[in-house]
Image (cartoon, rainbow, N blue to C red):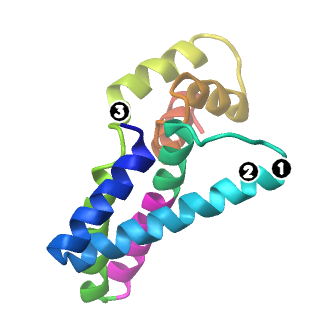
């Protein structure tokens, strides 16, 4: 079953179960995926969205929620932080598990190795190895440590 179809099926289940949190998140996700599809068509790219593209949209929204959670906690708004954390749990169900920090570190070691390489080139090479699955923040920190910056 394609990822978008799974989300739509889970939306029906959440509607039947009257799970307001899941229902809201899934409706939002479907809306964002639809917007991405429209954007893609406007660029002249036709066809159905691949699971990788759908997961990219989900990952983008997940990251926004994660950042919002941190800001709410810093601002002393624990009630809103808890709400965002509940929504993150729904997002987790649709994201494939990314590479571990050890896997990323091995890739950084391979890319940087012994040669002289700049930060941008190293980031691009490491991120391409994981096809966008790796957290850019983690990769950035590991590359900076390895390059001594």
Q: Is residue 119 above or below residue 40?
A: above
Report the residue marked by disc 1.
43
In the picture of the structure, the residue carrying the numbered disc 2 is 40
Residue 52 on image: x %, y %:
52, 37
Image location (x, y in percent) of residue 41 = 76, 51
Q: Main SS type for the magenta part?
A: helix
Range covered by the magenta-colored residues: 61-75
Residue at horizontal 44%, vertical 49%? 4
Vertical relation: 72 (above or below) 15:
below
Kind of element beneath mark 3:
helix
Residue in the foreground of this view, choosing between 24 and 112: 24
Circles 2 and 1, Cβ within 8 Å, touching? The answer is: yes
Using the rendered view, name the quadrant where residue 35 is placed.
Answer: bottom right
Q: Residue at x 74, y 57 (%)?
A: 39
Q: Do the numbered discs 3 and 2 sit on residues whose CB atoms are within 8 Å?
A: no
- Residue under numbered circle 3: 101
Alpha carbon distance from label 3 to label 2: 32 Å
Q: Is residue 27 left or right of residue 36?
A: left
């Amino acid at each position: 079953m394609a990822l978008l179809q799974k989300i739509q099926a889970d939306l029906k289940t959440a509607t039947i179960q009257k799970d307001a949190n899941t229902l809201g998140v899934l409706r939002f996700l479907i809306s964002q995926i639809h917007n991405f599809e429209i954007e893609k068509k406007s660029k002249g790219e036709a066809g159905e969205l691949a699971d990788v593209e759908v997961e990219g949209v989900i990952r983008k929204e997940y990251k926004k929620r994660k950042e919002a959670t941190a800001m709410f906690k810093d601002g002393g708004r624990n009630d809103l932080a808890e709400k965002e954390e509940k929504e993150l749990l729904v997002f987790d169900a649709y994201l494939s598990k990314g590479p571990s920090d050890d896997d990323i570190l091995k890739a950084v070691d391979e890319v940087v190795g012994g040669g002289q390489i700049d930060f941008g080139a190293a980031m691009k090479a490491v991120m391409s190895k994981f096809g966008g699955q790796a957290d850019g923040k983690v990769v950035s920190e590991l590359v900076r440590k390895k390059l001594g910056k």
